[in-house]
Amino acid sequence: MESRDAVHWADQTALKIIKEHGDKEQYTCASGITPSGTVHIGNFREIISVDLVVRALRALGKKVRFIYSWDDYDVFRKVPVNMPDQETLAKHLRMPITMVPDTFGRDSSYARHHEVDVESILPAVGIKPEFLYQAERYRASTYAEGMRRALEKREVLKGILDKYRDEDHKIQGEYWPISVFCDACDRDTTEIEGWDGEWGVSYSCECGHRETVDLRKAKGVKLSWRVDWPMRWAYEGVDFEPAGKDHHSQGGSFDTSKHVVEEVYGRKPPTTFRYDFIGIKGTPGKMSSSKGKVVDLYDLLRVYTPELARYLFAGTRPNTEFTISFDLDVIKIYEDYDRTERIYWGTESAKDEETRARERRIYELSQVDEVPAKMPYQVAFRHLCSLLQINLGDVEKTLAQLPGVEEHQLERLRVRAKCAWTWITESAPDEFRWALREDGSSIETTEEERAALVELREAVRAGDLDEQALGTRIFDIAKAHGLEPKDFFKVTYRALIDRDRGPRLAGFILEVGADRIAKILSVY
């Protein structure tokens, strides 16, 4: 593939990686996060962005190692408001996250709880990285050489870190690129007192403990963030890693890390791009795990099918800010995906060849695994919502009403139907929700309206009309009783679902069925 043929940003990035790092036997793509709270959909943007690039590299026939680092040896700095037993969590501030207890009572630690949540759900959207646990690695002294190298080059590091700082914020006094969790109290309330030039590091803690440790054996020593990140780039041989716009700001952690990995660890920095923040529709600002204001992948998959969840990101450039919607936008997003699917399978034309190629690639990257062998069965999300409400949320009964469904198509339809029902019952605007008036109640009507409803009931009961003929009959009934068609539609909707409007009336009546409609209208 030439760069001019790459219609999707993931393919363009894959070609850039190969150009910048040469033709290699294997490429390493990386992502990672600190499990300090719920891993939200904003964090997921980085994970899936890397996954899309990994898929693009593999499509070029390249071997790829996709690593995801859990930075679970970071400091527990703040208790998120959405976590249980705040008092217990507060007692563990300043400790490594991996040493904080899981106040949900499910996993071995607070960090592990959030890791398990993510590791359990990622396969549902086709993402299967190799997970690396930094607490395990630091405690095993895996990075002893990297830490010693940083100590040897600490003046160089100090210069790199000061490069983007004004005079008031430059590092004052002696600089140490490492920190220590106290062996006595497990907190990072320590100060480095000296380094012997080889493996020995001395520190003291606010708790009164003081000792000298050997980097090759110590469990509590770790590098500071802006040194740790590039050290691991070098250690793992990372060729690609994106970062959020906060890290990609001028003089931000990515800028300094590029210098560190080159000047201290002697390796070329990874290819990268900046991804933007994600908002929640109707809520200002970006999501924050520490503040507890989050939507996670579990929430997303309750309303969007796995393919739709991938489509949201595959169809949007990473440097574009967007919001996750749970309102009426959901219908449009499903419609957009269905159109992309039809373009892929050639049942709908794109406006030009470039659009067709781009939509086809977006569709491929939206699939959890492989593209299905044949075009999936399509039922419009809006129509599916109507059918589900007719059937009181009974998914199997609803699917049985769809004509021509094959056995292999049922599972995708079942997932879509469950998402649609969740949206209707929990997120849809009130005017979109309705229920058939099957309690024997009636509405107030004029004599003409009542007579028209009776005639409609008898027409439906006769059962010899298709949708087009029934639609014509409804107009004729309105005129015959001196009613404006729009007014009769309103009366009929109110009589049937207690709303002023609803699904296309003739088709809706036929879907509900003559017996149920006749019973509802029998009170007139």
Image: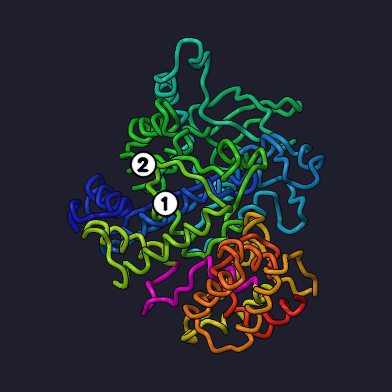
Structure colour scheme: rainbow
Residue 478: percent from left, percent from top: 58, 70
Question: Which region is colored magenta?
Answer: 368-389
Above/below status of 8 relative to 87: below
Query: Which of disc 1 and disc 2 is earlier in sequence?
Result: 1
Residue positioned 61% across, 66% down in the render: 488
Count of residue discs: 2
| Residue bearing mark 1 | 49
Above/below status of 319 relative to 159: below
Residue positioned 41% across, 42% down in the render: 320
Above/below status of 364 relative to 244: below
Q: CA distance from mark 2 to mark 1?
A: 10 Å
Q: Is residue 320 magenta?
A: no
Using the image as rendered, state which of residue 508 and residue 308 is in the foreground. Answer: 508
Q: Is residue 378 magenta?
A: yes
Given the image, on which type of amino acid does mark 2 rest? Phe
Q: Which mark is residue 273?
A: 2
Q: Are marks 2 and 1 in contact (CB under 8 Å)?
A: yes
Query: Can residue 218 be spotted in the picture?
Result: no
Task: Answer with left or right where residue 454 lies relative to residue 465.
Answer: right
Using the image as rendered, state which of residue 408 and residue 104 is in the foreground. Answer: 408
Residue positioned 38% across, 43% down in the render: 234
- Mark 1 is surrounded, within 10 Å at the Cα level, by few (under 14), some (14 to 19) or many (20 or more) other residues, namely many
Query: Can residue 524 be spotted in the picture?
Result: yes
Residue positioned 66% across, 41% down in the render: 96
Quarter of the figure with the N terminus:
bottom left
Secondary structure, mark 1, is: helix
Given the image, on which type of amino acid does mark 1 rest? Ser
Using the image as rendered, state which of residue 280 and residue 165 is in the foreground. Answer: 280
Secondary structure, mark 2, is: loop
